[in-house]
Image (tube, helix red, strand yellow):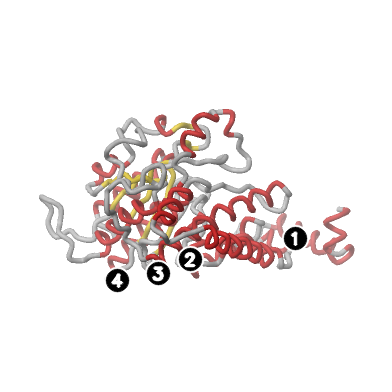
Amino acid sequence: MDFEDADVHRRLDADGRPLERGYEPPLSEERLLELYRDMRLSRHFDERMISLQRQGRLGTYASSAGQEGSQFGSMYALAEDDWVFYQYREHGAVIDRGGLADYVRYWMGHEAGNATLTEHHVAPLNISIGAHVPHATGMAWASKLRGDDSVVVCHLGDGATSEGDFHEGLNVAGVFDVPAVFICNNNKWAISVPAQSQTASRTFADKAEAYGFPGVRVDGMDPLATYEVVAEATERARDPDASPPEGATGRARRPTLVEAVQYRFGAHTTADDPSVYRDDEELERWKRWDPIPRLETFLRERGSLDDEAIETIETGIEETVAEAIDRATDVECDPDDLFEDAYADLPDRVREQRASLRRLREEYGDDALLEDH
């Protein structure tokens, strides 16, 4: 599964220059600059979140550095009311839709920050590998049954393709022709397991053939190529008058499996040490394809971007992320939340624990309780 295989759809070379002479991007100049800004914002957000985790202000966090091209390239291809399901690394979905402060709050341990994602048509973050795939298929099927034209996009990692939920979800999607786009973010490593150990298939996109719908490979570090592929896939899923595949009858609104080939620059999570299973040479080889400088070069050579504009963008990015973090930390914790959502009816022993904590709070106060007890 070579990144430079001919069947990987790509618009920009490693230096950010178009592969085709006279290439015109599918987005307006304004949207191209927004795309660049969002990708830089995501990288800065990633750096700040890792810093907060190292300070003990954040729980375990999954870095997205290197994968901004696939995240924003795909998000820019969606309609506002399309739903997005993701694993835990596609922070670009939240940045694109808004709600950044609530999202930071979730990583700081407040579950309410995860729940508010639904206000932006983003399903809550999923930790169980691949468990969200059947849910995405179900929501897409519901969209079809309702007769609306919304599409469900489901992000997953290459490791998720080894889970039964992946196969069950895609099989149902193919049988019932649900309006879904499944994006397999093949970042070459599922924690410490290399992509080639996940499958005997030539590519992950090839798996779509078994489910009866298209599979496409794209350079996930090229946001323009990703946009084109996902836009075509969403149109295929959205169009009720789409032509049925050869030999089929009455089929429309076809799903697609997109394999976004890319590389995870950082650790799997802040609890991981990638130096144990991969070498620096591999990392440096992939950094040549970094999506942010590639898009920057493309925009500079079009005359859309210069040093002054980049400085303005960077200042705005820093302010946006700093404000989101400040808002996220400006919240009062309620220890009673520890006992919510684990049980429909609290067992007696848990009720006793809650009552005991309440008595300690009344006697010592929350601050003293955290310091001395």
Q: CA distance from mark 3 to mark 4?
A: 14 Å
Task: Tell me, for residue 80, which label it has, or none.
Answer: 3
Q: CA distance from mark 4 to mark 1?
A: 46 Å
**Three-letter code for the amino acid on which mark 1 is drawn:** Arg
Residues packed near mark 4 inside 10 Å, few (<14), some (14 to 19) or many (20 plus)? few
Which of the two residues, 97 or 241, is positioned nearer the viewer here?
97
At mark 4, the secondary structure is: loop
Residue placed at 70% from the left, 46% from the top? 54
Q: Which badge, 2 or 4, comes first in the chain's sequence?
A: 2
At mark 2, the secondary structure is: helix
Q: Which residue is mark 2?
A: 97
Q: Which badge, 1 or 2, comes first in the chain's sequence?
A: 2
Residue 235 in view, yes or no: yes
Residues packed near mark 1 inside 10 Å, few (<14), some (14 to 19) or many (20 plus)? some
Residues packed near mark 3 inside 10 Å, few (<14), some (14 to 19) or many (20 plus)? few
Q: Which badge, 1 or 3, comes first in the chain's sequence?
A: 3
Kindly check if marks 2 and 4 are in contact, taking CB atoms under 8 A apart as contact: no
Residue placed at 57% from the left, 64% from the top? 312
At mark 1, the secondary structure is: helix
Query: In this rendering, which labeled residue sits more in front, label 1 or label 2?
Result: 2
Query: In this rendering, which labeled residue sits more in front, label 2 or label 4?
Result: 2
Q: Which residue is mark 1?
A: 354
